[in-house]
Amino acid sequence: MLRPWDTQFWLEDSPGKTLHSKLLNKLTEDIKDGRLAPGSMLPGSRTLAKQLGVNRKTVQQVYEELEGQGWVVIRPKSGTYISQTLPEQTLTLSNEHAVNSQDKAKATSQLVEILYQDAVCAYSREISGNDGTPDSRLIPYSLLARTYRKVCINLSRHSKLGYGDPRGTTELRQSVKKMLSSDRFMSCSDKQICIVRGSQMGIYLASRVLDPNKGAIVVEDLCYLPARAAFESNGFKIISCKIDQNGLSIEHLREILGNYTISAVYVTPHHQFPTTVCLPMDRRLALLELSKSHKFAVLEDDYDHEFHYDGNPIPPLASLPHSENVVHIGSMSKVFAPGLRLGYIVADPSFIERAAQEIVLIDRQGNTVTEIVLSELMESGEVKRHIRKIRKQYQARRDFAAREFKRIFGSGVSFSLPTGGMAIWIDISKLVNGKLLDSLPGSDSTLSTLYKYDQISPTHLRFGFGALNESEITRSVEQLSEVLK
């Protein structure tokens, strides 16, 4: 029997960020509104996919999800039908309150919600935001694949894929210890090291170990917002400290210490995020002396130590005198790719033990296979060789990006060439001249307003060159010029 009419669907006005969510929401809405009556037959997955111009698998997945929710019934060799008995749609206010789990959940902050939505959107896009991310195209995939295969075979043969130490595998902690000793002048034992899933997890764990009842956390005036969100989520009062062309202002920090009880100071001394400036030695020593005299922790986020191009980098805070209160947080994700999720915390053994106790509650332990793979690559010298190779490439990209900004913008913008990292901090105040900019073209530039709460109009942008080759850098800078010039 032929259908008298083919049911048409329109997804343009349907809520959702992906085709999957748009179609799911549209069909659910049409069933609730009665447009799709109980017992009526939906178009076949191939027919609907052709009508909407989407992949057939998307339609099949939506149908399966609707069946799981009780909206449709899939009959093999027959078709997909609207269920005769629909899910309960009308509840009394008291019953609705009883089944609504959101009423029982803690409210989140607006900052956390924004960061979460950015992360979800970034995952659904082919190219996500780039304010200094590494280029995943430079990963030595063949080497990684061979090492993963070798490690998986060895671990399975020796039955070592069970539960392990929440602080991380002994092999990787010892490899990190050697690296810190040789490359960063840090003397520590493997009991002072805890492996984590990237520096963000290290920051969050540190804020879990610290006590918000014992003081506020000081952050740099322009700062890494996910760190601030982690501190706020654990109940800390946040106080901003001024920064200048040399990083954290010690004078302003002294004023803050005179007026508040401080639990910790969070800093990015190697390349201040987002301005890229390096904290000079005199300020580092002054910060450590204040930490010792006022008994606050220093959370040192050393997120890109490997990428320093001009001369030798200043040693980390954790390697200097009076560094007893320093919690050093590092990452190996930028060496390869953020998706590998490997970082570490270096601190007093008692602090590390408390961090490991938190890990037991949320994760039990890290990824044993990936940790052993990285350890083997570090011990064989492959990590050092890879860093040496890509450091030259990132330095060349930095220099090329600087030349392109000068060529395209001339004196309209100004910047100091960063000594390292994967981004340039560009002064665009001459071009903005009071204009309000909500966004920029592309995903390679981030306005300074996104790093500070109380800034009214943007004065700078952070341009990420690390994930771009030369032609992509040129295209991105030219797109910027169309908006700013």
Image (cartoon, grey):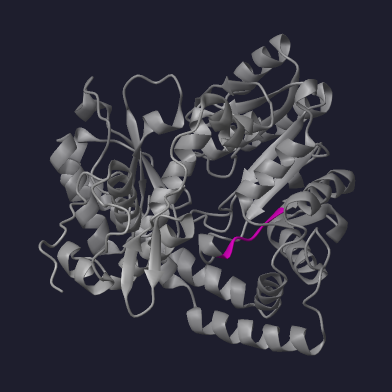
What segment carries the magenta color? 340-344
Taking the spot 43% from the left edge, 61% from the top edge, the residue there is 67
Taking the spot 66% from the left edge, 43% from the top edge, the residue there is 203
Taking the spot 38% from the left edge, 55% from the top edge, the residue there is 84
Vertical order, 2 against 365 (above or below): below
Taking the spot 82% from the left edge, 83% from the top edge, the residue there is 159
Q: Position of residue 253 (x, y in %)?
A: 64, 20
Q: Is residue 194 left or right of residue 380?
A: right
Vertical order, 403 against 377 (above or below): above
Q: Position of residue 16 (x, y in %)?
A: 33, 47
Q: Is residue 424 left or right of residue 408?
A: right
Q: Position of residue 233 (x, y in %)?
A: 64, 32
Q: Is residue 447 left or right of residue 437?
A: right
Q: Can residue 417 be seen at all in this image of the molecule? A: no
Q: Look at the image and tell me in which quarter the C terminus lies.
A: top left
Q: Can residue 100 be seen at all in this image of the molecule? A: yes
